[in-house]
Structures are given as structure tokens and as C-alpha cells.
Image (cartoon, grey):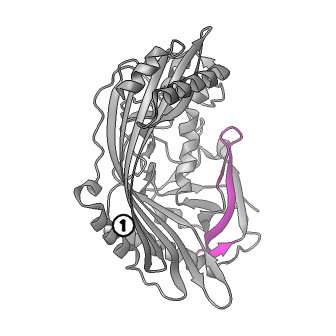
């Protein structure tokens, strides 16, 4: 590393630099149905170097990867190429972050045991659910990861973190002589909970079975509530988070101003309170530092429906004159709502759980998408349905949305499990 830094300093065109080292230790299992096909241990190191070049008051950057086996001549050539690329894409000038406070330690029980033992317990939890020749997981892949990240720059910043997370990739299938239905599902976790894994796998197996049995949505349902259930809940709340990012303000594409309402003047639904955070227990994308090496801390952006602050990267913070950048915070935390699901369920609704792709456009307000599996509640029972699209506009709905008391944690989100959207159109 000292050799690399010396060669960076020797190049007079390099005004600043950042070096990010990522060391990954991964234990992996690959199953076909319930049969273990492969187990694999992977250790890797990636060193990414970013050089910053100043030209006439502007700043550009270029990147290359570094390996200890590289010769001096190879490193010098890589630096020259990165400098050339930096001069081709210039932005307004910005400064790199300086030395930071010590980051938080990311909690995870994955660090307490050998990955091999944990992976075996994860596999047992997955296959504890009832599976047979009709209902089964055609392929299951389990990954347990330890990632050590160190970031230094030419302004004296030295920061590091260790994070642990797991991933379970499933392709559950419901297969009969008449037809076969498959779904894809990725589970991510930063804390091992055997009961939570069993429960989620059971829910996914139910989803594929209900996909198989789903009927077309009845026509002419009129004005009916839509309930979002699943990862897409986080996408709806991202509508607000993205708007309060420094980058959105810099590009003048923001809709909300500080001290103003993010839900409009006539809020009939749940008042919104939201923070951006580095960490929530179990959220797999938790980080204690960002790509620039900034130490991350929880940061409130919305309080009772009012925008109270912005958040984002060091670069965009500099562009808009923000002196204390939050860094790129990975987790959205939303205060739970005041409506239990049983209250939402007093009227007919369609609960949407699987989309081909959720549509979200912040500027137009468009929200919706093709629903591959939903549940139509006719006032008495839920019926699995498919083959329809719903569409609405968050500019109009944002003051009428209801958020559930029930909470859930996903990879980069903690908050209400359900969102109720009134007055949407079914296609």
C-alpha cells in the first residue's frame, strides 16, 4: 500500500485520491431440490483506487483496481489512464471528507459462530417446511458473508468497518401434470433467526401455490382500496427519501422544501415520520461508513409530515453548500402507523404481494404496476388473483395513505408492513 501511495503522490496531475479495500469471506451452499450439490469457501480482496484531478476550477475522477502483484510500471500506467479519464468528465469542484469519528459497530450474531455451522442451520430452517414432488424449491443457494472495508484518502481520512450478512436465494415451484409455476425469491438478513427463516420460506411456498391457483381478478370492482404488502412498501417510502436527497436538490428536481409539508395541506391519512439510518438490527444492507469513508449516523428527515432536513453524499453536499454531510445512508426507518391491518381489512381490498415490476416515478407521481399475485378480499374471504394492473398518483394519494401498526424489516427498510392506497385505478 505504501508503494501505491508513493506512486500516486509522484503523479503531479493527481490532486487527491481515495483507496478502498474490501476483503470478503464467504461460505456458500448450492442445493437442487433438497440435495446439496456444492459447498464452497470464497476469500477475495478488492482494492479500488479513485484519483481526483482538478482542471480550471472543476474536478473529475477516474478509477482503477490495484493488486499487490502489480509492477510499478503497471501501477504508473493505471494512474495515467485514470487521470486521462478524470479529465474527460469534469464536475463542479468539491473537497474530500477529512478524518472522521469512529463508526458504530454493526451488530450481528453471524459473527458468533463458524459460518459452516450457521449455513447448515440455515439449510435445516429452509427445508423444515413441508415440501414434496409438487411443492418444492427447485434451487436453493445460501451465502454467508463477512466483509471488511477500509477506506483512506489524501485528506487524512482513515475509516473501517466489518459487516456480516446472509442471503438465501430460492426458486420455489408448484408443479403438476397440468402446469408448473415458479417464483424467484431472495431473502437477506444480518442476524440469524431460525424461526424467521422458517416463517418466510413458508410464506414463499404459499405464494407459489397461490400463484398456481390464482384466478383472474373480477371485473368492475369500482372504487377499491389497494394494500401494498412486501418489499415494494420500501419503494413507496423511497418517493419521499429520494426527494430530500442532496443530489435531487442540486439538480433542482426536488418537489419538497424544508419546513414544508411532504403530504400536502389536507392530510387525512397517517402523518409521516422518517429517518435515514446506517443500521437497523437484521437489515442486511446496514453500513457504518459510506463509499467516501464518512461515519454514518441516524438522521431525521421528516417529522409528522414536515420535511426537516436533507441527506446524501459528500459530493452533492458540497455542491449545495451543506457543511455537515450525512453520507449515503442505506436504511429507511419509518415510524409505524396508527392503523392495524384488521382495520384496513374491514372493507373490500386487493392486497398486492408480487409484482412483475413495481412502477414508481417521483416526478410524475406514478405508482403501480402489473400484479402477478394479489389477494382480493370480497368482504368475507381472501381470494388469490392475478392478471391485472393498478395505477395511482402519489402526488394525489400522499395525504390519504394509511400505514399499518404492524412492522417489518427488509434489507434496507424498517417500518410499516402494509400501506393502504385509496382511489387507485384497476386495469
Region of the chain picked out in magenta, as a range:
358-386
Q: Is 342 rendered above or below residue 420?
A: below
Dominant SS in magenta: strand
Name the spot of residue 155 as percent of width and height, x first: 39, 17
Q: Is 393 rendered above or below residue 153?
A: below
To which quarter of the image does residue 181 belong?
bottom right
Left or right: 399, with 75 as reference point:
right
Which residue is drawn at the image coordinates 39% and 45% (left, top)?
286
Q: Is 127 rendered above or below residue 270?
A: below
Name the spot of residue 369 as percent of width and height, x first: 69, 57
Name the spot of residue 145 as percent of width and height, x first: 37, 54
Residue most extreme to the bottom: 177
Front in this rendered view, residue 400 or 141: 141
Left or right: 426, with 352 as reference point:
right
Q: Which quadrant: the N terminus?
A: top left
Front in this rendered view, residue 86 or 172: 86
Front in this rendered view, residue 399 or 134: 134
Q: Residue 227, can we see it?
A: yes
Q: Residue 267, can we see it?
A: no
Specify whether residue 387 is painted magenta.
no
Residue pointed to by mark 1: 196
Q: Which quadrant: the C terminus?
A: bottom right
User: Dot 1: few (<14), some (14–19), or many (≥20) neighbours within 10 Å?
Assistant: few
Q: How many marks?
A: 1
Amino acid at each position: 500500500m505504501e508503494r501505491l501511495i508513493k506512486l500516486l503522490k509522484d503523479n503531479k496531475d493527481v490532486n487527491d485520491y481515495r483507496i478502498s479495500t474490501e476483503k470478503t469471506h464467504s461460505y456458500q451452499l448450492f442445493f437442487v431440490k433438497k440435495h446439496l450439490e456444492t459447498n464452497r469457501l470464497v476469500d477475495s480482496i478488492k482494492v479500488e483506487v479513485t484519483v481526483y484531478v482538478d482542471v480550471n476550477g472543476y474536478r473529475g475522477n477516474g478509477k482503477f483496481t490495484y493488486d499487490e502483484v502489480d509492477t510499478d510500471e503497471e501501477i504508473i500506467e493505471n494512474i495515467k489512464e485514470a487521470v486521462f479519464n478524470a479529465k474527460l468528465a469534469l464536475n463542479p469542484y468539491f473537497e474530500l471528507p477529512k478524518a472522521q469519528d469512529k463508526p458504530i459497530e454493526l451488530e450481528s450474531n453471524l459473527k458468533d459462530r463458524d459460518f459452516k455451522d450457521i449455513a447448515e442451520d440455515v439449510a435445516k430452517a429452509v427445508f423444515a417446511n413441508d415440501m414434496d414432488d409438487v411443492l418444492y424449491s427447485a434451487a436453493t443457494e445460501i451465502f454467508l458473508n463477512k466483509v471488511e472495508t477500509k477506506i483512506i484518502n489524501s485528506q487524512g481520512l482513515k475509516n473501517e468497518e466489518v459487516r456480516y450478512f446472509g442471503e438465501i436465494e430460492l426458486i420455489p415451484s408448484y408443479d403438476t401434470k397440468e402446469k408448473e409455476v415458479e417464483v424467484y425469491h431472495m431473502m437477506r438478513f444480518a442476524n440469524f433467526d431460525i424461526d424467521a427463516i422458517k416463517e418466510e420460506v413458508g410464506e414463499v411456498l404459499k405464494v407459489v401455490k397461490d400463484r398456481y391457483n390464482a384466478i383472474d381478478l373480477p371485473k368492475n370492482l369500482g372504487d377499491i382500496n389497494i394494500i401494498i404488502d412486501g418489499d415494494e412498501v420500501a419503494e413507496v417510502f423511497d418517493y419521499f427519501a429520494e426527494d430530500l436527497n442532496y443530489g435531487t436538490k442540486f439538480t433542482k428536481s426536488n418537489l419538497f422544501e424544508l419546513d414544508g409539508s411532504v403530504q400536502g395541506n389536507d392530510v387525512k391519512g397517517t402523518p409521516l415520520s422518517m429517518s435515514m439510518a446506517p443500521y437497523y438490527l437484521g437489515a442486511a444492507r446496514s453500513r457504518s461508513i459510506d463509499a467516501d469513508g464518512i461515519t454514518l449516523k441516524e438522521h431525521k428527515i421528516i417529522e409528522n409530515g414536515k420535511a426537516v432536513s436533507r441527506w446524501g453524499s459528500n459530493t452533492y453536499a458540497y455542491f449545495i453548500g451543506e457543511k455537515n454531510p450525512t453520507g449515503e445512508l442505506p436504511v429507511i426507518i419509518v415510524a409505524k402507523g396508527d392503523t392495524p391491518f384488521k382495520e384496513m381489512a374491514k372493507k373490500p381490498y386487493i392486497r398486492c404481494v408480487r409484482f412483475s415490476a413495481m412502477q414508481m416515478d417521483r416526478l410524475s407521481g406514478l405508482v403501480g404496476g402489473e400484479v402477478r399475485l394479489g389477494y382480493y378480499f370480497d368482504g368475507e374471504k381472501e381470494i388469490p388473483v392475478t392478471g391485472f394492473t393498478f395505477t395511482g398518483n402519489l402526488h394525489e394519494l400522499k395525504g390519504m395513505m394509511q400505514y399499518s401498526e404492524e412492522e417489518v424489516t427488509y434489507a434496507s427498510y424498517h417500518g410499516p408492513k402494509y400501506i393502504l392506497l385509496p382511489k387507485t385505478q384497476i386495469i
